[in-house]
Image (spheres, rainbow, N blue to C red):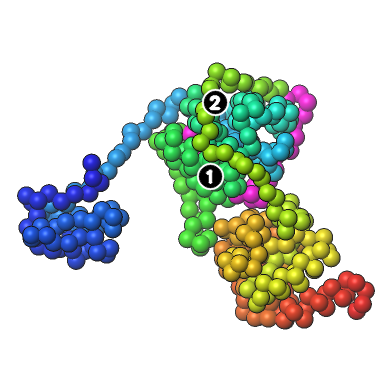
């Protein structure tokens, strides 16, 4: 059935709908409205304009709320690469353990892959009560299509009330797919998670930046389970290991068949330009449009190498093609939390600040004294970076 249609018997040819449509999706044919579905966005403006005649109808598919009383507990997706848990997993577990205090329910984790049993033991050492595991050579690190099916089946069988993952490249792709399969909601890139009792039920409050970080939106999923969210890297505190008296268990899901893959991973190519991982770096030197030319990133790279730092960049520099996306810091890039963050020629757009403002010490170098970056910087140098950075490197070399 078409999502929107005109009822010819009710259409009077008044053209009110044509005037109301901002997308030029409605034309008059033989004095009757006709909707071009390729242009129509189902915004509903034409329906409002036609209230008097009720000649335009939108058909929406709706879903009934689930029996959420059958769902309990918190579950974490254990992302891993090349035999190691992704750093964000410990942060998600840390957030889940805080929620567990308010819920008083078990904390579990879904672990899929080949030869992952040691990782299951590691998850238990951080306070996970149960690891729901499928260990098979048919599951690769990046087999997202297979993992989406398996995660969905495990969630529908075990019925946790909350399912959390990291806001990584994998998490941002896998969890939305799972949410669509199990007909639940998902809040991406959360910076805060908490439990609140609403109408006698304990609900997960999921808070994330919206509208470019200008406001913080708190989202609830009242009628569907599990409540799903991804957590931005370097926002939550990592979980600490628990004592040896903690007893967790591994539950194997060998009864679930592994589907045939429709995506084949041919190879994994490491970014050779990223000498130090941004997410794990203690010091980051980032460059922006103030560098004026891509070749000038050599100045940033030399400075970073001299002080043992990772190289970051603003979105503007990445969009200009000066440096690969893997170096981008900000709301649409990586969230970092180093000991020292040095921003060189970066104005400080709110999207960039969202990815680095949690740094312990922020040093800004910019020739514009009114640049927004100085509002968050602990130390600011107003000057030409092409003069300031070489002088700093000379001082570090003992030439000053």
Distance (Cα) linking label 2 and label 1: 20 Å
Q: Main secondary structure of the magenta part?
A: loop
For the magenta stretch, what is the residue range?
Answer: 226-246
The N terminus sits in image quarter: top left
Task: Say the numbered circle drawn on residue 14.
Answer: none
> Does the magenta segment cover residue 244?
yes
The C terminus sits in image quarter: bottom right
| Crowd band around label 2 with a 10 angstrom C-alpha radius: few (<14), some (14–19), many (20+) | some
Looking at the image, is 11 positioned above or below residue 147? below
Q: Position of residue 133 (x, y in %)?
A: 62, 26
Q: Position of residue 326 (x, y in %)?
A: 65, 56
- Quadrant position of residue 41: bottom left
Looking at the image, is 53 positioned above or below residue 15? above
Camera-side residue of 373 and 36: 36
Chain-order first, disc 2 or disc 1: 1
- Reading the image, the residue beneath label 1 is 173
Residue sitting at x 11%, y 60%? 29
- Reading the image, the residue beneath label 2 is 258
Q: Position of residue 143 (x, y in %)?
A: 58, 37
> Does the magenta segment cover residue 353?
no
């Amino acid at each position: 059935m078409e999502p929107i249609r005109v009822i010819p018997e009710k259409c009077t040819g008044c053209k009110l709908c044509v005037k109301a449509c901002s997308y030029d999706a409605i034309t008059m044919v033989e004095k009757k409205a006709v909707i071009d579905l390729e242009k129509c966005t189902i915004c509903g403006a034409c329906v409002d304009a036609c209230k008097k005649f009720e000649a335009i109808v939108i058909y929406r598919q709706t879903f009934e709320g689930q029996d959420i009383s059958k769902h309990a507990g918190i579950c974490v997706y254990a992302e891993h690469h090349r035999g190691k848990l992704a750093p964000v997993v410990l942060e998600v577990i840390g957030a889940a353990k805080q929620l567990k205090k308010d819920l008083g329910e078990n904390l579990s984790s879904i672990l899929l892959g080949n030869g992952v049993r040691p990782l299951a033991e590691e998850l238990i050492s951080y306070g996970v009560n149960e690891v729901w595991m499928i260990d098979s050579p048919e599951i690769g690190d990046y087999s997202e299509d297979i993992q989406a099916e398996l995660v969905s089946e495990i969630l529908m069988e075990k019925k946790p009330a909350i399912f959390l993952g990291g806001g990584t490249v994998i998490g941002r792709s896998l969890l939305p797919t799972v949410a669509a399969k199990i007909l639940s909601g998902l809040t991406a890139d959360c910076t805060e998670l908490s439990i609140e009792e609403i109408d006698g039920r304990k609900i997960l409050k999921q808070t994330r930046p919206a509208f470019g970080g200008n406001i913080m939106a708190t989202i609830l999923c009242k009628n569907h389970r599990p409540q799903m969210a991804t957590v931005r890297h370097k926002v939550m505190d990592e979980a600490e290991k628990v004592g040896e008296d903690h007893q967790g268990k591994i539950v194997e899901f060998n009864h679930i068949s592994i589907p045939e893959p429709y995506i084949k991973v041919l190879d994994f190519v490491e970014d050779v330009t990223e000498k130090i991982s941004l997410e794990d770096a203690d010091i980051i030197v980032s460059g922006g449009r103030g560098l004026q030319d891509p070749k000038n990133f050599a100045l940033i790279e030399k400075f970073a190498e001299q002080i043992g730092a990772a190289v970051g960049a603003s979105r503007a520099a990445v969009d200009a093609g000066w440096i690969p996306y893997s170096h981008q810091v900000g709301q649409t890039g990586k969230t970092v939390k180093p000991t020292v963050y040095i921003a060189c020629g970066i104005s400080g757009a709110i999207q960039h600040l969202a990815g680095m403002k949690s740094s312990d010490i922020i040093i800004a170098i910019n020739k514009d004294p009114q640049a927004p970056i100085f509002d968050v910087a602990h130390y600011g140098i107003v000057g030409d970076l092409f003069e300031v950075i070489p002088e700093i490197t000379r001082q570090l070399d003992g030439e000053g």
